[in-house]
Structure formats: C-alpha cells, structure tokens
Amino acid sequence: MMNQQRFFQPKAFCFLLASFLLSSGLLAEETETADTAEGVASAESWPMYRGNPSLDGFSPAKLGASLQEIWVFEAQSSIKSSAAIVKRRVFIGSDDGFVYALNLNDGSLIWKFETQGNVESSPLVLDDHVYVGSGDGFVYKLRAADGKLVWKYETEDQVLGGPNWIQSPDGKNTWILAGSYDFRLHCIRADDGTKVWDYETGNYINGSPAVSNGQTVFGGCDALLHVIQLSDGKKVKEIEAGAYIAGSVAMAGSKVYVGHYESEFLCFDLDQGSLKWKYRDRSFPYYASPAIVEDKVMIGGRDRQLHCLNRETGERIWRFSTRGKVDSSPVVVGEEVVFGSEDGRLYRVRLEDGKEIQSIDVGQPLTSSPAVIKDWVVIGSEDGNVYGFHAKSQP
C-alpha cells in the first residue's frame, strides 16, 4: 500500500520544500571541514560502505529530533547499493546499471555513469574519485566532479561488494580492494588501475573486505573467514565459519564479527585464530553486516529483527522487531541506531534499550543500508527510489 504521506508529497513538492528550507536557513548548506579525513566517516562525510575501512558501521554525526523526507530521486530499477556522501554529494548505484551522483540538498541529478551490469556495489569516494564495482565484472574509477571514466579494472565475474582502500606499505600509493564472483580478492593501484595482487578463495565473494591492523578479513560462499596480509596478499589464516557468508564482516582490534546463512552470528578472535562466541536465536539467516560500538554489536536478521548483543560475551541485550526481513545493515549514530527493513520502513531506535524513536514508511522494501551524516540519512529502496531525509538540529 502506498504511504499516505508520500502520496501528498510528490517529487516536485519535495524540491520546493528543499528550496524553502535552504532559503529560510532551516537547512544549512554545510561544507566539508578542513580536518575531515579522506575515506573515513565524519560528521559531514560517509565515504564508503559501513563508513570506515574496518566496516564498523559507526557515524560520528548526530541527528536532530525528527527526520522528514526532503527529496526523492527516481532511478530506473531497484537499489541495493548503499550511498556514499561526500562534499554534499550523494553517490549510489542501481540495478539499472548506472552510478548516480546527486545533490544532497535537493536530490537533483548531477551526473550518471552507465556500466554494462547491475550496480549493487556501494561506491567508495576517495581523493575526489569514485570507485565502484558492477555486475559486468569491472571495477570503475570515476571522477567525482563529473563522472568521467579514469580507468576500469576487469575481473572474471560480477563485483557486488563495495570496494575498500589501504595505503601501500611505502605510503606512496593508495590500493583499492574488491572481491569478485571469480573467487578472488583483487588489490588494485588507485592511480592507474593495474593489479598489485589477487588472492584466490574457494567460492564467490559477496561482501566488502574489512581492513584493520595491516590485514584484510572477508568471508564468502566457501564458508571460510579469510585473513590476508595486505602488504603482499599472502594468507595469514583461514577460519571455519560453518556456513556461507553473504554479508561483510566488521572488525574491532583483533575481533571480527559476522553473521552467516545458517542462522548464527559469530565473533572470532584473530589473535587466537578461533571462535570466541556464537549467537543463535531462531532459524533465519543473516545477510546484513554488523555495527560495533565500545560494548555492543548489532545485526539485522531475516527473522525480522535487529539484534543487539554484548560485544564480549555474545549475550543478547535487546532485540527490536519489524514486519519484514532486516537485510539493511544498521548504522550507529550518537545514542541511536538507524536501519531499514523489508517492511518498507526506516527505523531509529535507542542504542541503550532498543526502544523506537521514529519510523518512516516509504512503502517499499529497504534492503540498502543507510548513509548517515549530520542531520541527514540517505537510503535506497527496492522501488528504484533514493530517499533523502533531514532532521533539524536541536538549538
């Protein structure tokens, strides 16, 4: 059923509302601060899937009291890609094969770039360029300003996970990491698109590789957790996960958190090379990626719930029920958690106890994960729309 609120706020009205808010000063045209680090989430920037190379799903921003839909951008097919937000621009892919750059303030199109496959990959924005994978088997580097192609790197199958990045060991170059359905993790020079190394696994790689402490960690359909040395692409260890991994891991120090298809959410200790704890509630798989804070870890499940656990013990602290599968990965921002559900709602719940703060019905399933900066949440939907929500800051 169509959301009644959206029915009375068509796209044209959303543009007028955004213009009014800008002119009245209720919606600020903020700019990136000089001390914002490239490729790492800040109050004004969400540059990649899960915000940071460790894929921890944490935003240092804050949201005002009540989000309101400001704009809607219509793509031509469903959106599973999660947005990046850098310098007041939104970058997102669609199953229609395009990568889009939008104006954050009003959702207007700045440019679009066509690939030859679906773009489920979430863009990485780094040093004024956009890196993104496609179902056509390529990783693309585009200019953030105008979407012009700089290079494309060919794998042997589709690239669905978002790229990650590292500095080369000598500090002179940036390397881009991307997993492919060709069973390989590819390490690519950012400047010229040439291969540094690749690492072969036993099956498809679905998610994004997490990066921390000189290593990258990722899972895939071979049911293994792969730990790889970033300097040369050599295996450090493999750890049995017990079932194939559809999402991405999140890293915090030597601890790695991940859910898998056989309905378990796991914590591994890389120093020990072993399982620290596992959580199982009901027989529904996990496709979402976790979010981590100091004492808690959260993940959405196909049991229609968001689960919050003690990071050290794996004991449940709370769970929040929705009416649909939760493949949308949660983002922690301030004292709350933001995520979408296939019931068509964007949720905000309290980090402390999981009590609902706000839910917004967009009327179509949300499997994309939210991008969050100060007073803004951007998320894509299965109906092919990208939604921009804004919350006025408290005085």
Image: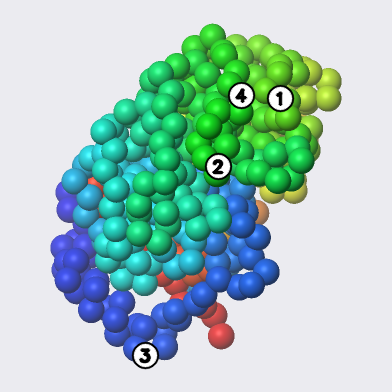
What is the distance, in whole Å, between disc 4 and disc 2 at their CAs?
13 Å
Q: Which residue is mark 2?
A: 190
* Percent of width and height locating residue 393: 52, 78
What is the distance, in whole Å, between disc 3 and disc 4 at their CAs?
52 Å
324, 381: nearer the viewer? 381
Q: Nearer the viewer, mark 3 or mark 4?
A: 4
Left or right of 186 in this view: 53:
right
**Mark 3 or mark 2, which is nearer the start of the sequence?**
3
Looking at the image, which residue is at 60% across and 18% down? 199
Q: Which residue is mark 4?
A: 197
Q: Which residue is mark 1?
A: 232
- Does 161 sit above or below residue 25? above
- Tell which residue pokes out farthest to the top in this image: 202
168, 250: nearer the viewer? 168
* Percent of width and height locating residue 194: 53, 32
**Mark 1 or mark 3, which is nearer the start of the sequence?**
3
The residue type indicated by label 3 comes to: Ser
Is the Cβ of the residue at disc 4 closer than 8 Å to that at disc 1?
yes
What is the distance, in whole Å, between disc 4 and disc 1 at their CAs?
7 Å
**Mark 2 or mark 4, which is nearer the start of the sequence?**
2
